[in-house]
Amino acid sequence: NGQTLTLPDIVLGTFGNANLAGAIQVCSDRPVTVSSRTFTREGAKTYGFGSQATRREQAIAPGSTRYIPDIRENGSFRTNLGLTNVSRTTATAKVKLTLSNGTVVGEQTYTVKPWSHIQRNRVVRDFTAANVAGAVLSIEPSGGSVIAYAAIVDGSTNDSSYVEALY
């Protein structure tokens, strides 16, 4: 109780490769709090984002829809979409992009294998080449439950904000 474990570079330390991407599942028979900071080193500086772990029970269930607001793709910002399948079966996620004026730009379907993670960089470009600000992504999975997030990246600093689909 009250103990802390810090793993400075879990990907390199565990898998021996710093160029991997994905999700890490943490299992425990006791209550545990998990957080992560993903970053890029540039000289003596770093930039990236921090996030708290999401419990599997909080994932988006098949047939449910959740939303991620403030989606941007323009000269100042870009948005990456992450989807993590927390199921034993392949999940598909129907994703819609709706502009701030309520116009639905389009719909894409992404497939995520069991216990896997994908990230779509500059996800807005999967829907439109136009500049976008204040849009919303809706995520509706089928076949399995998913955790969905957006990393909204500031183009001038490469710093990003983590926004999880929570409502």
Image (tube, rainbow, N blue to C red):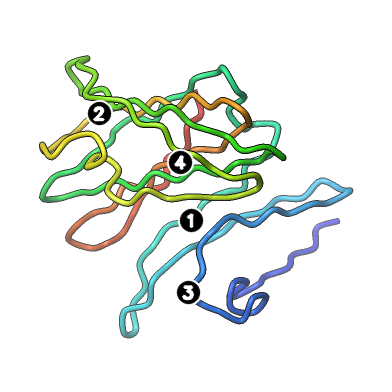
Say which residue label 4 marks. 149
Q: Of residues 60 and 51, which is closer to you in this image?
A: 60
For the residues marked 1 and 4, what is the alpha-carbon distance in whole angstroms?
Answer: 12 Å
The residue tagged with tag 1: helix, strand or loop? strand
Residue hosting label 3: 19
Q: Which of marks 4 and 3 is in front?
A: 3
Mark nearest the camera among 2 and 3 is 3
Instruction: Please name the residue that numbered disc 1 is placed on.
Output: 50
Secondary structure state at the residue bearing disc 3: loop
Q: How far apart are marks 2 and 4 (CA)?
A: 14 Å
How far from the left and from the top, in percent, is residue 167? 49, 22
Amino acid marked by disc 3: Asn
**In the visual, does 45 lie left or right of 61?**
left
Q: Dividing the picture into quarters, in which one does residue 49 lie?
A: bottom left
Left or right: 142, with 66 as reference point: right
Count of number-bearing discs: 4
Circle 2 residue: 135
- Mark closest to the chain's N terminus, 2 or 1: 1
